[in-house]
Image (tube, grey):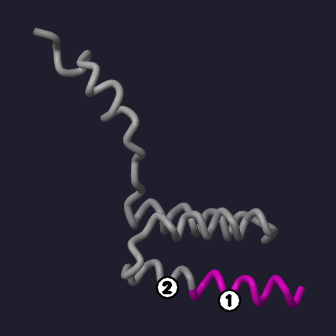
Amino acid sequence: MWPIRDCFFTKFYVDEVPKLLTESQVQRSFQKLVNSGELTDVTFEKAEALLEELRPESPLRHRLGVQLEELRTVAAKS
């Protein structure tokens, strides 16, 4: 009998499953991203990608989305 970790199914399917971020990881990454310096289009794209990691009904997603829109407004005025 093969060990479970050497099984084809495990290597092909389980190892290929994308790792989802926790809300805590998304929040930490979002804050690092927007506080790291200049806010560019790339920064906003990365922040949007982080928000997509969260469930649509997540209060954190809503809060960070509002914060992102405020940052876009401030960046546009600069």
Give the image location of residue 44, x and y in percent. 71, 70
According to the picture, the residue beneath numbered tag 2 turns out to be 63
Determine the residue positioned at 49% across, 85% down.
Answer: 63
- Residue 21: image quadrant is bottom left
According to the picture, the residue beneath numbered tag 1 turns out to be 70
Determine the residue positioned at 31% across, 35% down.
Answer: 14
Crowd band around label 1 with a 10 angstrom C-alpha radius: few (<14), some (14–19), many (20+): few
Helix, strand or loop under label 2: helix
Does 48 lie within the magenta span?
A: no
Q: Which amino acid does label 2 sit on?
A: Arg
Q: Which amino acid does label 1 sit on?
A: Glu
From the image, which quarter does the N terminus lie in? top left
From the image, which quarter does the C terminus lie in? bottom right
Helix, strand or loop under label 1: helix
Give the image location of residue 30, x and y in percent. 57, 67
Give the image location of residue 72, x and y in percent. 74, 83
User: Earlier along the polypeptide chain: callout 1 or callout 2?
Assistant: 2
Give the residues drawn in magenta, as a range: 66-78
Q: Is residue 21 above or below residue 77?
A: above
- Residue 77: image quadrant is bottom right
Crowd band around label 2 with a 10 angstrom C-alpha radius: few (<14), some (14–19), many (20+): few
64 left or right of 47 in image: left
Please identify the dominant SS of the magenta region. Answer: helix
Determine the residue positioned at 60% across, 85% down.
Answer: 67
